[in-house]
Image (cartoon, rainbow, N blue to C red):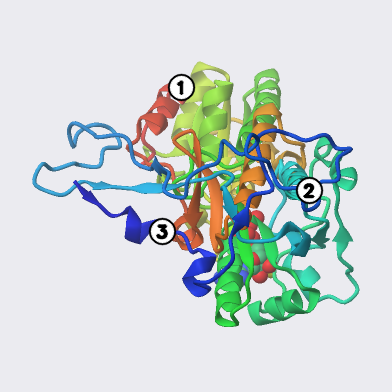
Amino acid sequence: YQRDFEERFNIPHITDVFPDAEAIRSTFCLKMRSPTEDFSGGYPSDEEWHGYINNKDRVLLKVINYSSPTSAGAVCIDPDCTWIEQWVHRAGPREKIYFRPEKVKAAIVTCGGLCPGLNDVIRHIVITLEIYGVKNVVGIPFGYRGFSDKNLPEIPLSRKVVQNIHLSGGSLLGVSRGGPAVSEIVDSMEERGINMLFVLGGNGTHAGANAIHNECRKRRMKVAVVGVPKTIDNDILHMDKTFGFDTAVEEAQRAINSAYIEAHSAYHGIGVVKLMGRSSGFIAMQASLASGQVDICLIPEVPFNLHGPHGVLKHLKYLIETKGSAVICVAEGAGQSFLENTNAKDASGNKVLGDIGVHIQQETKKYFKEIGTSADVKYIDPTYMIRAVRANASDGILCTVLGQNAVHGAFAGYSGITVGIINTHYAYLPIPEVIAYAKSVDPNSRMWHRCLTSTGQPDFV
Ligand code: ATP
Ligand code: MG
C-alpha cells in the first residue's frame, strides 16, 4: 500500500500559522452538567474528562476493493498499480481546545438556496457553543450580504432563541446569492471581532468560506472558519449524504404520486415531474426508485434523445398504448442541450438553466398530435415546495451531529474545513477537496441500474 492521507486530506490547524498557540483543557465533556451551575470558566474535572477524539483518529474514505474491472461502477484495482488508501480526520470533541470560550465571538451564516435542515444545524451550533461556555453568538442575516449591508444588524443567538426553530423549514437567518468581496467580508469580521465563523451552504458558499479562511491566515487572524455542506442535490464529494437529501426524496415522492394519480386518471395521461439536480441526478434517481411509479427517469449524467426511433417520445407512445398512462421524472439539469442557451447567470455566477420540464411537456403534446392522437400532459415542478419543508427525523439527527461537530472542529483549532458523514462516521475534510467538482451518479453503477430495472426504461440513444 501507499498511504497518502498525510498530504491529501490533511486539514489546516491553527498551529500551522501560530506554532505557539495556547491550548487549554476542553470545556466540553461527555458528562452533562446541571444548567443551574455557572458554566463559564468551569472546566471538566478528571472524572468528567473522557470520551475525546484523538487528533490522529482517521476514518477510511474508500472501503470497496473491486474484484474485477467488469464489476458495475468498478474502479479497476490492477495488481500492478498502487492502491492508494484514503483516510480522513475523524470529527468530534478534542481534549485540548485552542479558543477560550469567554473570548469567542461566533457567527453563523447561511448562503445559497434553501434546504431542509438549515435551522436544525443552526440550532445545534448555538446549543453546542453554549455548552462550551460561549456567550457571544450571532447570526449574519441573508448570507454573505449581511457582512456588508449596514441595514442588516447581527441577530443575537442563544439556546432560548433557537429552541424551536427546527420546527419550521427555511433559515432563521435568511439566505442570499451574490454579495460582497472576500476582503470586505474579512474586514467586517475583524471589525466585529468574530473569531469563529460557521458557514452553511453549497459549493459556492464553501468556495467563499475557503477564501475567507485563506484571507484570515494572510492577515494572521486567529480565526476558525468551518463549513457545513448544504446541498439538497447530495452532490458533495466523498460524503455518504448531505442533510436535507432524505427529506427532499421523501417530499419528491409526493409530487411523483400526484403526477401518477393525474396521469392514471386521465385518458392518455402523462405526468411530468421536474426535480432538483443541476448537475447530479441523485434526487430524481432516488425518488424514482422509492416511488416505484416512474416509467422514465432522466438525469444530467445520462444522455438521451427525445425524438428518433430510440427517443423518449417513441417510448411514451409505447407506454400509452400498453399501459394507458406514463410518468416521467426529470432532473432540472437534464437535456439542457435541447434548450436555448441564454448565457444568463444568477447573482452568484451560476448558469441559469432552461426549463426542461416545460420543454418535455410541449414536445410530448406536439408529438402525439403529429401521430394523430392526443396526450393529456400534466407538468409538476415541486422544487420550492420541497426546499421549504422542515427536515424529517433522519435529517434532523444528521443536522444535529453535523452542527455539534462543526463546533468541535472550530474549538479544536481547525479552520478551512467542512464536516460530513463518511462511511457512517463523521469526519472533517479540507474544503478544497469537497468542492473540486460535483459528485454525480455513475451511469455504470449498480444504483442507476436498479433505477432502470424499476422504471423499465430502455436506452434513449
Ligand atoms: P446552492 O447549492 O444553493 O447553489 P451555493 O453555496 O452553491 O448553494 P451560491 O449562490 O453559488 O450557492 O453561492 C453562495 C454564496 O457564495 C454567494 O454569496 C456567492 O457570492 C459566494 N460564492 C460563490 N462562489 C464563490 C467563490 N468562488 N468565491 C467566493 N465566494 C463565492
Ligand atoms: Mg451551488
Upstream in the sequence, badge 3 or badge 1?
3
Left or right placement of residue 338 versus residue 245 in this view: left
Q: Nearer the viewer, mark 2 or mark 1?
A: 2
Residue located 56% across and 49% down the image: 419
Q: Mark 2 sits on what residue?
A: 130
Q: Quadrant of the C terminus?
A: top left
- Between the residue at mark 2 and the residue at mark 1, the CA separation in whole angstroms equals 48 Å
- Please give the label number shown on residue 454: 1
Upstream in the sequence, badge 2 or badge 1?
2
Is residue 244 visible to the viewer in this orientation of the structure?
no
CB contact under 8 Å: marks 3 and 1:
no
Q: Amino acid at mark 3?
A: Asn
Disc 2, SS = helix
Q: Nearer the viewer, mark 2 or mark 3?
A: 2
Q: Mark 3 sits on what residue?
A: 10
Residue located 56% across and 33% down the image: 328
Quarter of the rendered image showing ligand 1: bottom right
Q: Amino acid at mark 2?
A: Glu
Is residue 417 visible to the viewer in this orientation of the structure?
yes
- In depth, the one of 132 and 76 nearer the eye is 132
Disc 3, SS = loop
Q: Is mark 1 within 8 Å of ligand 1?
A: no
